[in-house]
Amino acid sequence: MAISRQSFPDLQATERGLWAPIFLSPILGSPERFVIAVVAATQGDFHIEVANALNRLFHLYGDAAEMALFATEVAISELEAALADEGPGALRSGALVFSGVNIGEVSSGEASSIEQLAKTWMSSLSSLYKAPVGIERAIANTDGESFSDRLPTLVHDHLFVHHPAVVRFFSDEIKNKRVRRSRLAGVSIDFSGSNVVANLATLSRGNHAKSVDMIKRKMFDLIVRRDKEHSSMFPRAHEMIVFSPDDQSPLVTERQVELIRETHEELSEQSRREEVEFVPLAEVPAIGERLANLELRIAV
């Protein structure tokens, strides 16, 4: 039985479209900027999710924030009109003429709806946005007790013994052996070194669907982190490293081998499309050594 093709961040995703962040630069000539909206569009539909906590700008700029709010309102109205006339073609550089507001890089994505696509990226990217209650619950339910994975801790413990110099690059949750309960504070990254950024997850035999869900969500987090570093002069590798049973293992049935192979094909295709490396390995030491080799640039 083949696994249906799925994408980020919703396993029930049915709509694919283009999306882009909308940036506001409150001070002309300054590199400082904020994500004030995310727009998602298809040929027949669009949605603009606007920052709902713009009042935070007053804490930074005082009364000068009034002009930023005015610029946001005008730019969003302008973009709505352009999307209604041109569809996704309106998502191009220079499409907004209001000073200080511009459209960021356009990417493709998939979610249960165009609105969901915009809201999900907005909740991940903007410090001027409070995720609605429904989004908070959906995000919170993807972590914590819904699927417990010991792999990051096991890899951490292996490296603590064999390559202690890289242990500091693990997240605080992993170093302190805590379970991350919510993604509302930002994306979840297990290992963030100087040369490699990686998330770790187990492809489970007994809880296959939930483990695939977790892998996809962790890949989604890597995409968010990678996109934030897109213009970096020193790009890092971004890898989704998965502990996956060897198809020669006597603990794996023929049916499970078939399912694992199908899952590998799907995740590999998704990773190529999203430009994130998918790395299935069958042993915890092998995963630890890969991280150490990439981070310490050890020749293998």
Image: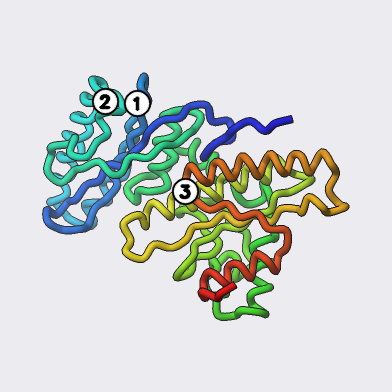
Choose mark 3 or mark 2, whichever is in front. Answer: 3
Residue position for label 3: 275
Within-10-Å neighbours for mark 1: few <14, some 14–19, many 20+: many
**In-image side of 125 versus 237 (left or right):** left
Q: Are marks 1 and 3 in contact (CB under 8 Å)?
A: no
Spatial separation of the CA atoms under disc 1 and disc 3: 25 Å
**Reading the chain from its start, which is encountered first: label 1 or label 2?**
1
For residue 90, what is the image quadrant? top left
Q: Nearer the viewer, mark 1 or mark 3?
A: 3
In the displayed structure, 119 sits above or below 169; it is above
Q: Is residue 267 above or below residue 289?
A: above
Task: Give residue 184's position: percent from left, percent from top.
Answer: 47, 50
- For the question of whether residue 51 can be seen, the reply is no
The kind of secondary structure element at disc 2 is helix
Task: Name the residue carrying label 1.
Answer: 46
- Kindly tell me whether residue 223 is visible in this rendering: yes
Residue annotated with mark 2: 83
Q: Please state the total of marks drawn on the protein image.
A: 3
Report which quarter residue 290 is drawn in.
Answer: bottom right
Residue type, mark 2 in image: Leu
Question: What kind of residue is marked 3?
Answer: Glu
Q: Earlier in the sequence, mark 1 or mark 3?
A: 1
Q: x, y percentage for residue 293? A: 57, 72
Q: In terms of sequence position, does the residue under pointer 3 or pointer 2 come before the other?
A: 2
* Quadrant including the N terminus: top right
Residue ID at (15%, 46%) = 100
Residues under numbered marks 1 and 2 in contact, where contact means CB atoms less than 8 Å apart: yes
Question: Which label number is shown at residue 190?
Answer: none
